[in-house]
DNA sequence: CAAGACCTTTCCGTTCACGGAAAGGTTATA
DNA sequence: TATAACCTTTCCGTGAACGGAAAGGTCTTG
């Protein structure tokens, strides 16, 4: 990381400067900022998850704040929620569809039409919520299980500390149900580098 | 699905029957039961996520309840939490390590040793919790955002229903901040089949 | 204006997580 | 015992998500 973050952002502003809120960044800068590679960003664009935002005269990609937010969102969905790029694409499309619906809504007064549009948005949202809630529930279950064990271990430690002062024990075997079934000795093909996930 | 679920589980019980709690299943049966393919199950075994449990005389894989639980767990982690097979492998290894630690704990009375073991278990658990909680937080954030929007839409609908009886409106444009940045018209390379995820 | 650091597209390579065919063995049933 | 329906291993193929080199263009600084 770091080398000097490049000489200076190019003062191109060819297309139209966004009131100079912040100069647009080039792909490498964005990549470093967010924690992606330029290659990934180009790939996401190729897959339709981003629009080119803007290009300099020399056709360099230029990213504004909204592009960056969008990329952060994509990375979050990928890393934290484990969505595939295609799934993220669908989520973003649904997003866009709802945005369109919002505009359509603003341009009609017909109650029936308005109702139709709102119902569509509702079920789109509900679909996404259903999917997310499933993941969420599973994850919460796992966290709860781990927390139970954590408490269990802490109790043991407390008990141990008490014994140190006290002496005399009740050497009880312990329990704790396994998260998955059975233990197995295999494992190794997968054991390699703890550390960088993915 | 379904064709007759095969003639009958083979009454092999070569190695040792588990008190006949339930007859072990063959790979196809397990696959159908859990919603995996035989190929995936063999792959997971190859990657060290399962031990062969048992084999019939003809070297058919036989799966008992604990194997099935383990496979369910693996599938849950894969589908719901979005973990890679390697990550799941690591989780299961940590699991196994803690199991060993529990046994080691039962076989020593040395308080220092016991403390060392328990501390190890604790930090292993904490590591996993940290990772999971990160995912969890992100997911909760998304769910919360979607729920806010859902409420928003519901309010609109209620308002609409009110107007139907009432007539006379305040035609307010609406807001709602975007989940990700900007809208873009592209999208298509990714648009294909809503439905079967993965 | 020359150098250096970045950028572009194109294309081929790689890893993961399997899918699927081939060649052959096993098990329950008719 | 013969057949059907499983199973085995081995190996090659595939789609997703990039990595990386090649060949060339662009921007900024000295």
Image (cartoon, coloured by chain):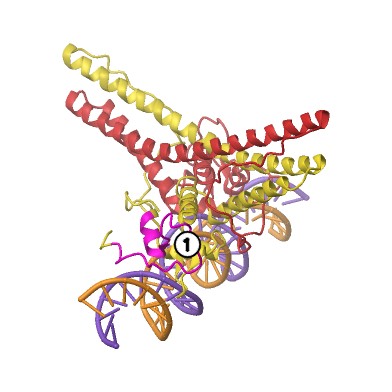
Chain colours: A yellow, B red, C purple, D orange
Pointer 1 indicates a residue of which chain?
Answer: A
Q: Position of residue B66 (x, y in %)?
A: 49, 36
* Residue that appears at 17% across and 26% down: B112
Residue A166, magenta (yes or no): no
Callout 1 secondary element = loop
Q: Horizontal placement of B20 versus D1: left or right?
A: left
Q: Quadrant of residue B121?
A: top left
Residue A84 place in picture, x, y as percent? 53, 53
Which stretch did the figure color magenta?
Answer: A5-33
A82 to the left or right of B35: left
User: Across the whole image, how many numbered discs are drawn on residues?
Assistant: 1
Can residue A156 be seen here? The reply is yes
Question: Residue at 68% across / 39% down in the picture?
Answer: B172
Q: Is residue A134 visible?
A: no
Give the residue at mark 1. Answer: A17
Residue A13's image quarter?
Answer: bottom left
- Residue situated in front as seen by the camera: B184 or B6: B184
Query: Is residue A18 shown in magenta?
Result: yes
The image shows residue B150, relative to residue B185, as above or below, that is: above
**Residue B124 versus residue A99: which sits nearer the camera?**
A99
Residue drawn at point x = 59 percent, y = 47 percent? B31
Give the residue displayed 37% in from the left and 61% down from the top: A29
Is D29 placed left or right of B163 in the picture? left
Q: Residues within 10 Å of mark 1 (few under 14, many from 20)?
A: some
Please provide percent x and percent y for residue A31.
39, 59
Location of residue A183 in the rendering, given as x and y in whole percent from the top left corner = 40, 38
Q: For the stretch drawn in magenta, what is the main secondary structure?
A: loop
Q: Nearer the viewer, residue B176 or A184?
A: B176
């Amino acid at each position: 990381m770091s080398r000097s973050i490049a000489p200076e952002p190019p003062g191109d502003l060819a297309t139209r400067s966004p009131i100079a809120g912040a100069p647009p960044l080039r792909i490498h800068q964005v990549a470093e900022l967010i924690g992606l590679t330029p290659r990934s960003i180009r790939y996401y664009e190729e897959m339709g998850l981003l629009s080119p935002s803007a290009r300099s005269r020399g056709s360099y990609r230029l990213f504004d704040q909204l592009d960056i937010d969008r990329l952060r969102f994509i990375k979050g969905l990928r890393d934290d929620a484990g969505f595939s790029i295609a799934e993220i694409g669908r989520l973003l499309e649904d997003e866009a569809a709802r945005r369109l619906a919002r505009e359509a809504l603003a341009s009609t007064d017909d109650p029936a039409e308005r109702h139709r549009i709102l119902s569509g948005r509702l079920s789109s949202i509900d679909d996404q919520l259903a999917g997310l809630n499933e993941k969420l529930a599973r994850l919460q279950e796992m966290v709860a299980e781990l927390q139970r064990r954590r408490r269990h271990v802490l109790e043991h430690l407390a008990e141990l500390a008490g014994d140190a002062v006290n002496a005399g024990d009740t050497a009880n075997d312990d329990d704790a149900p396994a998260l998955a079934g059975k233990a197995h000795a295999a494992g190794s093909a997968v054991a390699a580098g703890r550390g960088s996930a993915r």
